[in-house]
Amino acid sequence: MKLDLLVMTVHPDDAELGAGGTIAKYVAEGKQVGIIDLTRGELGTRGTAETRKNEAAAAAAILGVQVRENLGLRDGFFANDVENQLQIIRAIRKYQPEIVITNALDDRHPDHGRASTLVNDALFLSGLRRIETILDGQPQEAFRPRLQLQLIQDKYIKPDILIDITAFWSIKEQSILAYGTQFNASTDDAEPQTYISNPDFMESTKGRASEFGRSIQVRYAEGFTARKILGVKDIFQLF
């Protein structure tokens, strides 16, 4: 299956938090959209890898994506090495997405920036025909997406582009809350409280979307960065 948009991020829930509205928007427009999680999030303080797997499946159903996979890299300890690069290259060549969104360039969680660099390097290498990969016994063709964007996650980074997600905020919020072990935990929960389980975290997520939205005169928006200068064919389509 060829995808129009692939969100490739390190932890289950990163895609929903950073790009859930954008995902829902393009699904609604009939685009082929997928999510690939690099790790199972097994080092998370709350829940388990198995509960996170079930939550990720529930969130994917809410968003309506055509594909969700997990590459099973080692949470917290993955390296930007040949083995992991080749896993990502196989996935990119399998789905041939036009656009890839990955983690923030730099963030509070060290996995985010490292994952962004890993995906960036693998995307370039995926376009080199002399790197040979096999999937299901068949050789894959070299392929490189035409655009790569990065999320803006915990650390504030000035966006290079904002996408209006006003009509899709509710879906984004539902997809995040599908991770019931991670967000909006009650105070009598037996598991340890964390930075993201506090209900204030969801309020700050909504506040960030509102702040971005105000910048382009809409209610809610998601922001992304680009490693290259972006261009448009028609400036009259800009906000």
Image (cartoon, rainbow, N blue to C red):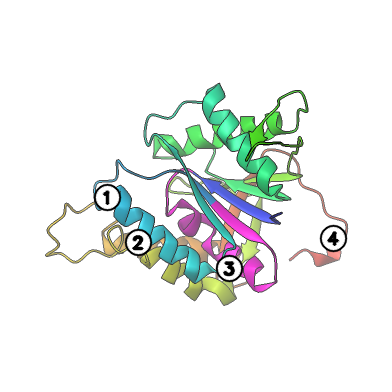
CB atoms at circles 4 and 2 under 8 Å apart? no
What secondary structure is found at the residue carrying circle 3? helix
Q: Which residue is mark 2?
A: 179
- Where does the C terminus fall, quadrant-wise? bottom right
Q: How many marks?
A: 4
What secondary structure is found at the residue carrying circle 2? loop
Label 2, label 1: how many angstroms apart (C-alpha)?
11 Å
Q: In the image, what residue type sits under mark 4?
A: Ile
The mark closer to the camera, 1 or 3, is 1
Q: Which residue is mark 1?
A: 48
Q: Earlier in the sequence, mark 1 or mark 3?
A: 3
Q: Is residue 168 above or below residue 130?
A: below
Which of these two is toward me, 86 or 204?
A: 86
Q: Which residue is mark 4?
A: 235
In this view of the protein, can residue 164 be seen by the observer? yes
What secondary structure is found at the residue carrying circle 4? helix
Q: Is residue 23 above or below residue 154?
A: below
Q: Residue at x 72, y 45 (%)?
A: 147
The mark closer to the camera, 1 or 4, is 1
Q: Which residue is mark 3?
A: 24
Q: Earlier in the sequence, mark 4 or mark 2?
A: 2
Which of these two is toward me, 212 or 165?
A: 165
Check if residue 32 falls in the magenta segment. yes
Q: Earlier in the sequence, mark 1 or mark 4?
A: 1
Label 4, label 2: how many angstroms apart (C-alpha)?
39 Å
- Where does the N terminus fall, quadrant-wise? bottom right
Label 3 neighbour load within 10 Å: few <14, some 14-19, many 20+: many
Q: Earlier in the sequence, mark 4 or mark 3?
A: 3
